[in-house]
Amino acid sequence: MARMLAGLAVLLLALLGAPPAARSDALTGGQNTAAASTVTMSLGSGVVGRLASVQRKLNDAISTDFRELRDHQSPTAFLLILGLAFLYGVLHAVGPGHGKAVVASYFVANRAHWTRGIAMGSLISLIQGVSAIALVGLLAVVLQWRQFDVLDRSTLVEFVSYGLIAAVGATMLYRSATGRGHTHDHDHHGHRSTALDRRLIVATGLTPCASAIIILLFSLANDALPVGVIAVVSLSLGMAITVSAVGLASVLGRQTIVRLLDGIGVQSHRFERGLALAGAVTIVSMSGLMMLGAWARL
């Protein structure tokens, strides 16, 4: 069992380190642009290609059900929208983004109880949904901005969010490099860990989910915004399952590796400090790259 958990942790980290797919065309709800379609087709025989295909079908089905709801006020269409949004969230969060790499790196770097892994993954996903609702509500509903304008502004929010994540990562890096993250004062250490948890949750959650924005824009186009809001909540719950699973696996994988090292007589505290440094560097590096990507789209 221990070896299986350790292997799972290594596999997850390897997957999270893979290069992200090309940016989706926002107005198609995650469908790729013509240039990115070539990339997706080349991966069609793999997991990424199959996931992309399923997400396109789910996206089309949700759009169809919104029209059905508008034209016939169908309760079945309403239930289908919620169910499809939930399933879409589970699968959509498997792809690049959604804070998985941040969550994994954070719990590889820090000691934590397994409940923290689940809590952080869930809260990040739910806040991303709320962020999308707030963005669309303010720009599209209150200010009556066009769809393209709303999507452009979401990029600015992404940029700020990545900057905040980088700041949290820099704090982690400083503490790891100076040894301040390995204090014997457990109460003080626990307080600092809780504070970092909260900062990272807020910073990562601020990035609005693009698919949630698309669902809300679909609902606006079909005069069904309340249904769109409920669908985004369902989507967020689906994403929470996937991101929480990553957090849980990271916590358990780290604990397993440390126990194995202790069992064979290796001084695990040195290894833990190396993990702390590696996790912090990963968070700073990835958030920095994502900031540059968002800046290029502004």
Image: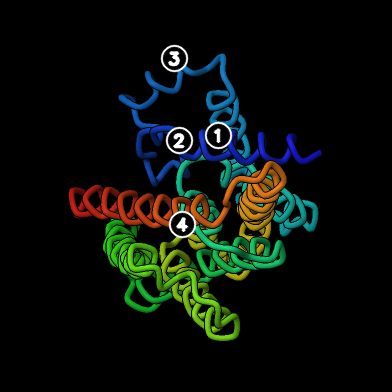
Which residue is under mark 4? 273
Which x, y percent locates residue 27? 40, 46
Residue 154 appears in which quarter of the rendering? bottom left
- Amino acid at pointer 4: Arg
Kind of element beneath mark 4: helix
- Near mark 1 (Cα within 10 A), the count class, few <14, some 14-19 or many ≥20, is some
Sooner in the amino-acid sequence: mark 4 or mark 3: 3
- Amino acid at pointer 3: Ser
Which x, y percent locates residue 278? 41, 50
Q: Which of marks 1 and 4 is in front?
A: 4
Check whether the beta carbons of the residues at disc 1 and disc 4 lie within 8 A of each other.
no
Which x, y percent locates residue 142? 38, 79
- Amino acid at pointer 1: Arg
- Vertical order, 85 against 45 (above or below): below
Q: Nearer the viewer, mark 2 or mark 3?
A: 3
Disc ID at residue 31: 2
Check whether the beta carbons of the residues at disc 1 and disc 2 lie within 8 A of each other.
yes
Q: Nearer the viewer, mark 4 or mark 3?
A: 4
- Near mark 4 (Cα within 10 A), the count class, few <14, some 14-19 or many ≥20, is some
Residue at 55% x, 77% y: name it.
184
Disc ID at residue 56: 1
Which residue is under mark 3? 42
Q: Nearer the viewer, mark 3 or mark 1?
A: 3
Check whether the beta carbons of the residues at disc 4 and disc 2 lie within 8 A of each other.
no
